[in-house]
Image: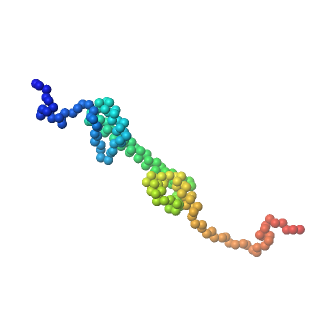
């Protein structure tokens, strides 16, 4: 039987797959996943050197995407645990926590409201850094320092008449 030519209808060109690497790799990624252009520039020459066709290279890209997704989830979990740890540290701190927690939190919020810009508040909220124990401590101290003075009522007044001897008790009379 004679060899089939490329124009032979029995073997359409769209069905024949080359075994070697394509001119340009084209990868399909899961929704929401983007391929890092720098990583692609690093990997593409290696894929070509290995002679991987697009379908086999796609398998490597799939594994890479899965690994990156797992790394991101693990990182997010560690960060979430760190934030929870900071909150618990503040709540149980001898100086900042316990019964003093609510008052210290109000003082810290007051300092941020007075001196912090909306952009700073957004950064602290979005990153979770607003829960860092040392930042809370700093803001609480600032808030307490800027708080209005309170009135301290005097005691009962002097007992008996005010004399020179009662006013200067260590003074010795002249002889």
| Closer to us: 81 or 127 | 127
Residue 57: quarter of image: top left
Q: Residue at coordinates 80% horizontally, 65% vertically from top-left?
A: 170
Residue 123: percent from left, percent from top: 45, 54
Q: Evaluate whether residue 151 shows in this view.
A: yes
Residue 151: quarter of image: bottom right
Residue 161: percent from left, percent from top: 76, 75
Q: Can you say whether 113 is above or below 44 in the image?
A: below
Is residue 126 shown left or right of residue 149? Answer: left
Residue 165: percent from left, percent from top: 80, 70
| Closer to us: 140 or 1 | 1
Is residue 11 shown left or right of residue 36? Answer: left
Q: Can you say whether 141 is above or below 5 in the image?
A: below
Placement of the N terminus among the 4 image quadrants: top left
Q: Residue at coordinates 33% horizontally, 45% vertically from top-left?
A: 33
Is residue 43 shown left or right of residue 130? Answer: left
Residue 91: percent from left, percent from top: 51, 54
| Closer to us: 144 or 28 | 28
Q: Can you say whether 131 is above or below 43 in the image?
A: below
Looking at this rendering, what residue extends furthest in the right direction? 175
């Amino acid at each position: 039987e004679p060899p089939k030519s490329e124009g032979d209808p029995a073997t359409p060109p769209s069905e024949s797959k080359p075994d070697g690497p394509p001119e340009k790799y084209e990868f399909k990624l899961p929704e929401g996943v983007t391929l890092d252009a720098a990583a692609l520039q690093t990997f593409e020459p290696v894929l070509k050197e290995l002679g991987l066709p697009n379908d086999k290279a796609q398998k490597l890209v799939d594994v890479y995407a899965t690994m990156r997704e797992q790394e991101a989830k693990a990182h997010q979990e560690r960060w979430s645990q760190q934030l929870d740890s900071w909150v618990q540290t503040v709540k149980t701190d001898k100086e900042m926590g316990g019964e003093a927690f609510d008052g210290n939190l109000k003082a810290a919020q007051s300092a941020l409201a007075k001196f912090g810009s909306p952009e700073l508040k957004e950064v602290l909220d979005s990153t979770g850094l607003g829960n860092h124990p040392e930042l809370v401590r700093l803001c609480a101290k600032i808030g307490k320092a800027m708080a209005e003075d309170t009135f301290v009522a005097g005691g009962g007044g002097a007992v008996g008449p005010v004399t020179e001897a009662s006013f200067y008790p260590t003074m010795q009379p002249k002889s």
